[in-house]
Image (tube, rainbow, N blue to C red):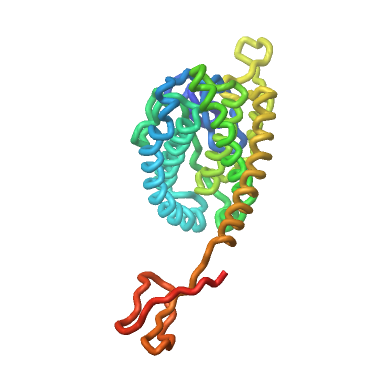
């Protein structure tokens, strides 16, 4: 698999992209058939007004993505059976889910200040999108498909830590963008790297790719290619090269994400254990217990009164 500088995926030994016609480097930036995500590693210039209202501007796209996501979950059930019996996800389902994952990535990139352009309200990709995803459609291992939910658990745990850690970075980025219209380069790259991991996890979980999302969390491995003139090797322009500060920010955000997640779980447990709980029951005019009530509405039969008893 080869990738042009615009991010389009082509077959091997292709000199020119079949979609845009640009020269193909001959090198792939992703391992195997992992989802390919292209976004600038240089922080974009944001409008201060859009940064200030970014949460509100993201609400409608988030709702649209969530609603379409319900259909995607249903479609993946059909994809699971199709891949289990034929070794391939049906092409129509693969295309629909891939478009949804792409839109979800664009919405997340905008809401988390990785991109400055609004993602719009349609899954249809635009030529001016700041973020592009590509994922090849191919055969799947039936055993890996059957156990996909179990195989994705380790990646899911890391994904949760990344989500929590990324939100901590976004808070700092929000203040920086509000003051200077740009986010710190290291935090921008770290957030983009975590976003790529989250998108690759979604692609793996939803049967778009057989590749686990671990590859590329700290950027792409050094993979230089020789140009046609025979000069010194150059780095393909689509490969991710994170700064040292960005790699450190990724590690720090993952650690802080784990701490934050554990802290929230402990806090919720403490709150739930300290909540006042009551048991409701009905008593008739003679003081006899007629019934216990465990479901709403809290109504008693005629001639009985509702009483509550604290149980903790």
In depth, the one of 252 and 150 nearer the eye is: 252
At x 41%, y 52%, the residue is 75
At x 61%, y 57%, the residue is 270
Total label count? Answer: 0
Q: Quadrant of the C terminus?
A: bottom right
Q: Position of residue 26 (x, y in %)?
A: 58, 24
Residue 102 in view of the camera: yes
In depth, the one of 126 and 192 nearer the eye is: 192
Horizontal side of 242 relative to 119 (left or right) equals right
Q: Is residue 310 above or below residue 153?
A: below
Horizontal side of 289 relative to 38 (left or right) equals left
Q: Position of residue 57 (x, y in %)?
A: 38, 32
Q: Position of residue 49 (x, y in %)?
A: 40, 23
Q: Position of residue 233 (x, y in %)?
A: 67, 15
At x 49%, y 58%, the residue is 85
Residue 15 in view of the camera: no
Horizontal side of 4 relative to 152 (left or right) equals left
């Amino acid at each position: 698999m080869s990738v042009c500088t615009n991010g389009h995926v082509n077959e091997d030994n292709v000199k020119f992209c079949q979609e845009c016609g640009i020269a193909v480097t001959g090198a792939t930036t992703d391992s195997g058939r992992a989802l390919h995500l292209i976004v600038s590693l240089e922080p974009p210039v944001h409008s201060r007004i859009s940064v200030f209202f970014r949460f509100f501007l993201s609400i409608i796209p988030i709702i649209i993505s969530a609603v379409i996501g319900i259909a995607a979950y249903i479609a993946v059930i059909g994809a699971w059976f199709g891949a289990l019996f034929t070794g391939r996800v049906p092409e129509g389902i693969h295309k629909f889910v891939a478009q949804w994952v792409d839109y979800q990535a664009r919405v997340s990139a905008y809401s988390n200040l990785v991109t400055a352009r609004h993602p719009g309200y349609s899954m249809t990709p635009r030529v001016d999108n700041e973020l592009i995803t590509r994922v090849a459609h191919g055969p799947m291992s039936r055993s890996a498909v059957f156990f996909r939910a179990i195989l994705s658990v380790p990646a899911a745990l890391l994904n949760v830590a990344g989500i929590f850690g990324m939100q901590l970075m976004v808070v700092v980025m929000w203040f920086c963008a509000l003051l200077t219209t740009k986010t710190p380069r290291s935090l921008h790259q770290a957030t983009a790297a975590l976003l790529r991991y989250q998108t690759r996890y979604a692609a793996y979980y939803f049967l778009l790719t057989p590749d686990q999302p671990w590859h590329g969390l700290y950027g792409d491995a050094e993979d230089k290619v020789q140009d046609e003139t025979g000069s010194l090797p150059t780095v393909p322009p689509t490969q991710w090269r994170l700064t040292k500060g960005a790699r450190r920010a990724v590690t720090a955000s993952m650690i802080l994400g784990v701490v934050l997640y554990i802290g929230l779980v402990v806090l919720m447990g403490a709150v739930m254990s300290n909540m006042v709980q009551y048991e409701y029951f009905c008593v008739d005019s003679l003081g006899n217990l007629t019934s216990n009530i465990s479901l709403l509405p809290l109504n008693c039969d005629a001639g009985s009164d509702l009483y509550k008893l604290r149980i903790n």
